[in-house]
Amino acid sequence: GFGVKRFAVMYNDFVLVGPKADPAGARGNDIASALRKLAAAGAPFVSRGDKSGTHAAELRYWKAAEIDTEGGNKPKGYQACGCGMGPALNIAASANGYALADRGTWLNFKNRGELAVLVEGDKRLFNQYGVIAVNPAKHPHVKAALAQQFVDWVLSPAGQGSIAAYRIGGEPLFFPN
């Protein structure tokens, strides 16, 4: 009830990044298999650990791999930084470890060190973004008309075109939908 209506606006995906040499053998297109390999190898893995959407997705992937990262039996190399995506990637780069990132942040990340995308293409890595205007019936102080203008624009051909045109190094960060 705090929002009026949710609209799917765009999507990208999550990727598992790690050392180009991939000492844990995680490379592929199955995120659960990759995480099992990281856990078995005791490889360094940096989790955001910040209750963000990316962190929630990461926890789903660990659960799909049947590995407990929230109890007392965390994998040997698992560490939660309680930080945003950029700092988590910086820690992973400095430790030559692994991390889950959304593709947009990865493409924008400049301090890659020896890191590369190792796991992509798994349908579970799909990352949907939406837009929701705040409900003026619950929050009368909001500028509902301006919010609706934004919703209308981001869903319009011009807004969707802007999403499609946003690129870093020639690669799209998001795909309109």
Image: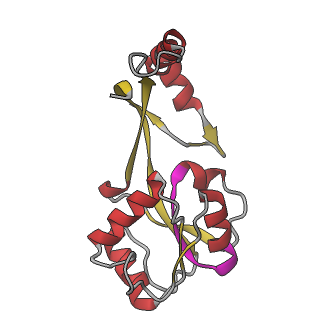
| The C terminus, quarter of image | top left
Camera-nearest residue between 7 and 137: 137
| The N terminus, quarter of image | top left
Q: Position of residue 163 (x, y in %)?
A: 53, 30
Q: Where is residue 173 in the image (x, y as percent from the top left)?
A: 55, 43
Taking the view exactly as shown, the residue that stands out farthest to the top is 145
Question: How many labels, in total?
Answer: 0
Q: Residue at x 68, y 67 (%)?
A: 90
Compared to 93, does 125 lie above or below? above
Left or right placement of residue 110 versus residue 133 in this view: right
Q: Position of residue 86 (x, y in %)?
A: 65, 58
Left or right placement of residue 135 versus residue 105 in this view: left
Q: Where is residue 80 in the image (x, y as percent from the top left)?
A: 54, 72
What's the image's color scheme? secondary structure
Q: Does the magenta stretch include residue 116?
A: no
Q: Residue at x 52, y 60 (%)?
A: 50
Camera-nearest residue between 170 and 98: 98
The span shown in magenta is: 93-103
Which quadrant would residue 130 be assigned to in this image? top left
Compared to 33, does 156 lie above or below? above
Q: Residue at x 47, y 85 (%)?
A: 24
